Amino acid sequence: METSILPQVPALLDLSRVDADRRAGLWVSTATTCFPGLSVSDMPAEVPIGQIQSIPMGGGSLWSILSAPAQVSYSPTGGGDDAASSISLLLQLDGAIVVGQNHRACELGPGDMCLVDERFGFHLQGEVCSHIVFLRMPRRAVLGRHPHLEHCTARGLDAEDPGAQLLRDTLTRAVQAAPDLREEQRGSVLAAMVHLLGAATAPRGDPPGEAPWRVRAALAFIETHLGDADLTAERVAEAGLDMIVTAPPPHGDEVTAIRRLVEEMSEAQTAIAGAVEEHTSVTAELSATIAEVAGSAQEVAGCLDTVSGAAQEKVAQ
């Protein structure tokens, strides 16, 4: 079993440099310090390996964990309401573990992946030595882009799916490249990984309680074209109409959800404008541009109602 996938990154813990009789205790204390709410049990008295490494990735972080067999349990310290909580994409490199959360469980072998949500408790059970890497991503960013993932944790991603393979290959390459990237580059990688989750976890249908496909489609269109100088409310409305006329008309909850997404984007754009004003000598021009986009986003909210009505009339005909 390899000892490090991040050789350039100093280890927070490396048991190879620790006396054998101190390894188990030091591993438990370090792991629980790095991850508040974590508890470790059933670790053997003789611990042959153990290493913890981490590197910041924008608003998240990338971790490499080399561990002896153990039972790991997690309970959210903020009672499940912590705004800073994360969703992690976990990749098994060596060994095997069982991941359990919210009455779901999956077994991971080398190359397998799953998601874990820190808002809820979870368990990791390893019967053999194991090496995992995981990317911690801001929970709000993940669920804002992929609302259905809240119900997809502790489910192994289909290793034969091309989208899952792309996600795994990208995460592996990101791990290898992360130590050589600048801080802003690592932030861009994190944002790209959040978006790429959709390639491997696209839902099939809309189970009860999950965001309808129209909400995801509308958000995807806006995000894809947000940097386009020609993006207008009319373009978004036309795209929405093209999608909707081929399906049943949207109901009120869907329109409300899309409006909420647009409003949140407008708030984010306003915050960006404020940050720009503090930082650069060309703030006037940039702020005006961002404000114009924010205004267009508000127009989208109004146009969506028009799109909904047009779709209903089209279906009625």
Image (cartoon, rainbow, N blue to C red):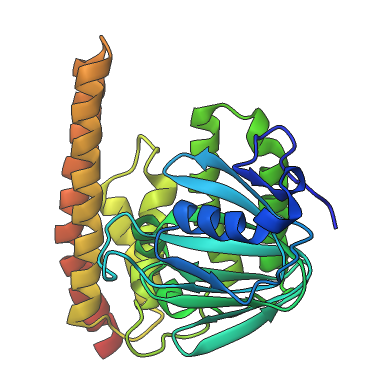
Instruction: Out of 236 and 34, give the one closest to the viewer.
Output: 34
Instruction: Out of 57 and 199, give the one closest to the viewer.
Output: 57
Q: Is residue 45 above or below residue 250?
A: above
Quadrant location, the C terminus = bottom left
Q: Is residue 308 visible?
A: yes
Question: Where is residue 175 drawn, in percent x and y?
Answer: 68, 45
Question: Where is residue 24 drawn, in percent x and y?
Answer: 64, 61
Name which residue lies at 32% across and 54% down: 84
Query: Looking at the image, which residue sits at the far right?
Result: 1
Q: Is residue 288 above or below residue 295?
A: above
Name which residue lies at 27% across and 61% down: 82
Name which residue lies at 28% across and 60% down: 237
Classify residue 14 as left or right of residue 292.
right
Query: Looking at the image, which residue sits at the far top?
Result: 281
Name which residue lies at 25% across and 60% down: 261
Q: Is residue 253 above or below residue 291?
A: below
Question: Where is residue 66 drawn, in percent x and y?
Answer: 71, 57
Classify residue 12 as left or right of residue 183.
right
Q: Is residue 310 visible?
A: no
Instruction: Out of 196 and 81, give the one closest to the viewer.
Output: 81
Query: Looking at the image, which residue sits at the far front?
Result: 21
